Amino acid sequence: MKKIGIVGGGCYGTALAACFSRVSEEVLVVEKNSQIITSVNQNRENSVSLPGIILGKNIVYTNDDNGLYDAEIIFLAVPTSFLKSACECVKNSATPVVLCSKGFDLENERLLSDLVEEQLPNDVFVLSGPSFAAEIAKNLPAKVSLAGKNFGKCVEISTKLSSKNFKLEPIGDMIGLQVAGALKNVLAIGCGILHGKNLGQSAAARFMVEGIQEMTQIAESLGGRAETFSKVGALGDIILTCSSLQSRNMSFGKFLADGGSLKIWNGALAEGIFAAKFIPNLRCSVKIFQKIYQVIYEQITVDEFLESVFE
């Protein structure tokens, strides 16, 4: 590709820029933080969000979104709260837009792709999968899924963007992939609690599998497909996020197990805290996710949580 655009130059946006700089002549990243822009353009390093990674010379950071007009594809890699404003950066309706944010539109009780499609006439796709930012930025092997309603275009994009160590797998289920991407962060909080209470790998395996079963049920209730949860973009992402303390969500769960609470948490943003607010709106019955929501928001104690999910 000649030019790839990314809105959001934080940790994951920078990692994507590093990945796609290997398959594109230019990667233009729109970022509002002037310190990040200066750091990358002068020193080839995002010292704020992803220090220690040297970025290619074909990566340019700017605060001017007009440069995205002639991009062949645009990735939205911002926190969910900034997604609507990120859509305003897209100037060309012919440009495919790829959603990388994980979570839900809580205000309207819907998927994030619904929000983006309401804001933009563009073809919208979803990128998700097991890909810690620091690892993919270092060009370590990883594979993710790209989902879209236009499956032919999805295949085309996946082929163009895949490199030796960063592969994209095209799938047709945007709903299931988004549910997995959002709720794996919630499930990871529960896994962090188990880890913090030293309940062992056997308990963690049971908890994770039963959580995936509930996640599949949620996806199907929203129109998604069960088979998506066997794909690397869903299952692989769940396993990664729920089994490593590199996951901010799992770290938050361990913090709760150690006696902490949401009120005093001052660690990195854990997306599952917000995604969990979608749980009470569900019409299907899911015990594990309901209990994770309740323990996050102090409706039950950690001990009550553990007793209820393993009864």
Image: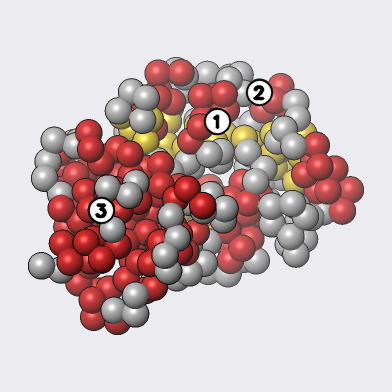
- Local crowd size for mark 2, using a 10 Å CA cut-off: few (<14), some (14–19), many (≥20): some
Q: Amino acid at mark 3?
A: Ile
Q: Which residue is mark 1?
A: 82
- Local crowd size for mark 1, using a 10 Å CA cut-off: few (<14), some (14–19), many (≥20): few
Q: Is residue 122 visible?
A: yes
Residue 248 drawn at (x, y percent): 50, 59
Q: Which residue is mark 2?
A: 69
Up-down relation of residue 303 to residue 82 (above or below): below
Q: Nearer the viewer, residue 293 or 79?
A: 293
Q: Residue at x 70, y 35 (%)?
A: 31
Mark 2 touches mark 3? (CB < 8 Å): no
Residue 68 drawn at (x, y percent): 67, 28
Dot placed on the residue nearer the N-terminal end, 2 or 1? 2
Q: Residue at x 17, y 66 (%)?
A: 307
Q: Which residue is mark 3?
A: 300
Up-down relation of residue 230 to residue 243 (above or below): above
